[in-house]
Amino acid sequence: MHGTAMGSGLFLMPLLAAVSLVSASVSKGTEPDVEMEVLGVVPLESESASLLILRQKGARTVLPIFVGRSEGAAIEQRLKHPPARRPHGPDLLSKAIGALGGKVSRVSIEGAQAAIFSARVTLQQGDRKVEVEGRPSDSVALAIASHAPIFATRALVSEAGLTEEDLARAHGGASGKADAEDDRSRAGPAQSF
């Protein structure tokens, strides 16, 4: 389910530019969420940040999310290696939830405001469901530790997701489209949706 890390130079600049332009608030609509998979983590040149890259299952749309460097490193470690002998935070939380008879049934990445995403972890214990808000980095790490699916709202993927065409346009590779499309590309990839 989880891919390998992407080359840091391949997506760094267009994703950085696109994510920084997301300013509209995206709220959860009535449309069903789309399932995502962790594609990898790209460390940024900044010492304090990384990009967590989620990809829509069955599509080529990616959803880049800024995370802290240590949180990104923890997710990347989990993707590449089996859990450590001594449990880290997400492992401990997953085991505690299991010991109490519950499970993490899903993680949902939700709205963005000024490129800050939120997440909701759905816990289930028998017939009882509880939703807990958290940071996307912590929530994704918990989903990986718990083998739970990761979703994003359709509206969020539409607003902040990037297609191959968006990435090519950010690199200057797509040209000759209709004037309206050209106008949108000058506005920035995140604003072209």
Image (cartoon, rainbow, N blue to C red):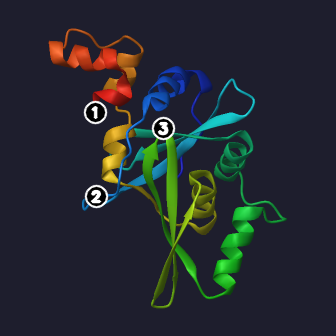
Q: Left of 146 or right of it: where is 108?
A: left
Q: Quadrant of the C terminus?
A: top left
Q: Residue at x 72, y 49 (%)?
A: 74
Q: Which mark is residue 193?
A: 1
Mark 3 vs 2, N-terminal side: 2
Residue 80 picture location, percent across and down: 67, 48
Q: Which mark is residue 29?
A: 2
Q: Residue at x 57, y 56 (%)?
A: 140
Residue 172 picture location, percent across and down: 37, 10
Q: Is residue 164 visible?
A: no
Task: Name the amino acid type tagged 1.
Answer: Phe
Question: Closer to us: mark 3 or mark 1?
Answer: 3
Give the Cα distance between marks 1 and 2. Answer: 17 Å
The front one of 116 and 82 is 116
Residue 115 picture location, percent across and down: 49, 38
Pointer 1 with pointer 2, Cβ within 8 A: no
Question: Closer to us: mark 3 or mark 2?
Answer: 3
Task: Name the amino acid type tagged 3.
Answer: Ala
Q: Residue at x 56, y 53 (%)?
A: 136
**Residue bearing the label numbered 3:** 114
Give the Cα distance between marks 3 and 1. Answer: 16 Å
